[in-house]
Amino acid sequence: MRATLMYGAGDVRVETVPEPTLQAPTDAIVRTVRACICGSDLHPYHSMPELPQGATMGHELIGVVEEVGPQVTNFQPGDFVVVPFAAADNTCPICQDGFQTACPHVNFFGPGTGGQQAEIARIPWADGTMVKVPGVDPATADESLLKSLLALSDVYLTGHHAAHMAGITPGQSVTVIGDGAVGLSAVLAAVRLGAGQIILMGRHKTRTDLGREWGATHVVEERGADGIAKVLELTGGFGSHAVLEAVGHMPAYEQAVGVVRPGGIISRVGVPQYEEAPVGFGSLFGKNARLAGGPAPVRAYLEDAIKDVLDGTIDPGKVFDRTIGIEDVPAGYRAMDTREALKVMIRF
């Protein structure tokens, strides 16, 4: 099969590799219908050391089940499924608490487990990981529906997780930091939770225009101290009750600290590219501000989100603004890296 491998920073190739096979009785084999490139894939694209054997890439997938292990009972060949970016058993106490990305059996797709920017994927813990899409034939489904279902494998539900972990209540002020696909998804999620004011911090007009379409009430282009000052001005000097940080770099965290209201919550879903960050009196402690967020447990939200897509309540697939074939994946990485594309979908 054809699959995407990264050999080092900026070095993405599409190569022929062996097809995956069942390795455990709880596995399933899924043929990819659509996959995509994630903003978090750009972190290794910028910094991965040279890796002679290459690393398989990709963690977002919708597809059709081809084969299941003898202990898989919820699926059969031909089922159309959404696959979250992390596999989990969905039966342990942690999963039952709704934090499947901390499951003792968690497998994050991509390097190590097998990337999903490929024609076929092996899905561990299939019964606990995948969710069936009822009544949809991917061969005849509208492209916009496929885009929205694909967005549920990571990007939209990561934005939703940011809003959920911030505990947004109706009428609150919310600031979203980052105008990438996750940040825009967080805007949509904040609207659904009833936020009264949504400030989107971003400077790319095509992206912030989608943010406005989805419900952002203000756009702040400034960064650093100027950006903080602008948000404080828009919030009467108090800051936002909830700050959704969808970038993962230290300047974004520092902006979050600067704009969060005393007693408010910073919810981070951008994969942090740091281990140490200010939490003392001058940052969080003095404000009685709380820090939340983490890897989105997509599986916890997936059934409800599929229903919302199928009944037209949400259309998160609008974040995909470019579609390519598998052979064009290296160009897709370049387009996202240079911000020529917001989010790239791969058609199989």
Image: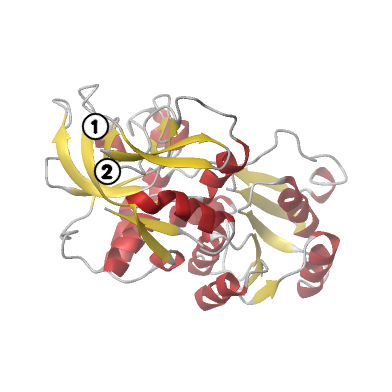
Kind of residue at disc 2: Glu
Residue at the location (41% across, 50% down)? 329
Residue 93 is drawn in which quadrant? Answer: top left
Q: Which SS class for mark 2? A: loop
Q: Which SS class for mark 1? A: loop
Residues at marks 2 and 1 touching, judged by CB atoms closer than 8 Å: yes
Residue 315 is drawn in which quadrant? Answer: bottom left
Residue at the location (77% across, 68% down)? 222
Q: Position of residue 334 (x, y in %)?
A: 53, 54
* Disc nearer the start of the sequence (2/1): 1
Q: Position of residue 338 (x, y in %)?
A: 59, 58
Q: Position of residue 103 (x, y in %)?
A: 43, 29
Q: Which mark is residue 251?
A: none
Q: Is residue 41 left or right of residue 205?
A: left
132, above or below 190, in the image: above
The residue identified by callout 1 is 19
Q: Foreground residue, 12 or 195?
A: 12
76, above or below 246, in the image: above
Residue 137 visible from this viewpoint: yes
Q: Furthest residue to the right?
A: 282
Q: Foreground residue, 143 or 13?
A: 13
Q: Is residue 56 left or right of residue 213?
A: left
Q: Position of residue 49 (x, y in %)?
A: 60, 30
Kind of residue at disc 1: Glu
Q: Which mark is residue 119?
A: 2
